[in-house]
Image (cartoon, rainbow, N blue to C red):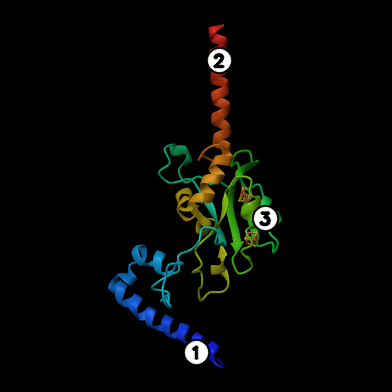
Amino acid sequence: MYGSGILRGMGVTIRHFVTTYLDDLKWGFRRHIPDEAFPIRQGIETRGVYTVEYPEEKLAMFERFRFVPFLVIENHDHPDPARQGKDWCTACGICAKVCPPQCIWIVRSSDPETGRPVTEPENFFIDIDVCMNCGLCAEFCPFDAIKMDHDYELASYDRTSAHIFDKARLSKEFRYWQAIAPTRAQEEADARGGWDHKDVIKQKEKEAKAKAKAEAESTE
Ligand code: SF4
Ligand code: SF4
């Protein structure tokens, strides 16, 4: 029949219109409880049309979402006091080399007595206005020390210095990475051989080998 497609289309629209209000009534005030309502109402099970009332409400972020990078530092309550808050970055400079728009600057630390370079960044800058969120820095970092963040609320009224993020602004505890990307964090830990920094794992392996060798020699 001529016009049946139009009627069917209008039927779909009306159905969505009605189910939107029915779903609102079903959820009542619970629709504003993020942990309860959001995963369902923003997922494939949602019914009707659901408007996210940003900034009061926010879309659930999927794990591989990537925004401006952050630097991983050791948790402040790490069991080894010497590691607490320590940078995972070794200032190797690979991320700065691979960054397509060249928006990373690294200032390497140096030993105050000898003046020789130390494998730690004294400072680390990213121009977030230039960063294109490509994720190459995170892909290439051999120490899992730079990661793509989920924090996209970076707007400010200052378009100059406030958008040059320094080490203090970029650094976030390792547990933050575990919280926003649990699957990736687990995969990386499996590849490294543990939850620790690559160098710590290597050191532990070295010590275990030395201990086993010493024990073997003492029993001979
Ligand atoms: S590649 Fe990783 S370890 Fe090297 S400077 Fe960049 S963040 Fe630091
Ligand atoms: S995400 Fe891409 S553009 Fe941004 S700092 Fe990393 S490599 Fe550079």
Respond yes or no on whether mark 3 lies under 8 Å from ligand 1: yes
User: Which mark is in front, 2 or 3?
Assistant: 2
Q: Amino acid at mark 1?
A: Leu
Q: Residue at x 61, y 53 (%)?
A: 138
Could you tell whether 51 is left or right of 188 in the image?
left
Q: CA distance from mark 1 to mark 3?
A: 58 Å
Q: Quadrant of ligand 2?
A: bottom right
Q: Residue at x 57, y 93 (%)?
A: 2
- Image quarter where the N terminus lies is bottom right
Q: Nearer the viewer, residue 147 or 4?
A: 4
* Residue at the disc numbered 1: 7
Mark 3 packing: few (<14 Cα in 10 Å), some, or many (20+)? many
SS at mark 1 in the image:
helix
* Residue at the disc numbered 3: 96
Quadrant in the picture for residue 200: top right
Quadrant in the picture for residue 161: bottom right
Q: Residue at x 55, y 18 (%)?
A: 212
| Rendered position, 191 above or below 56 | above
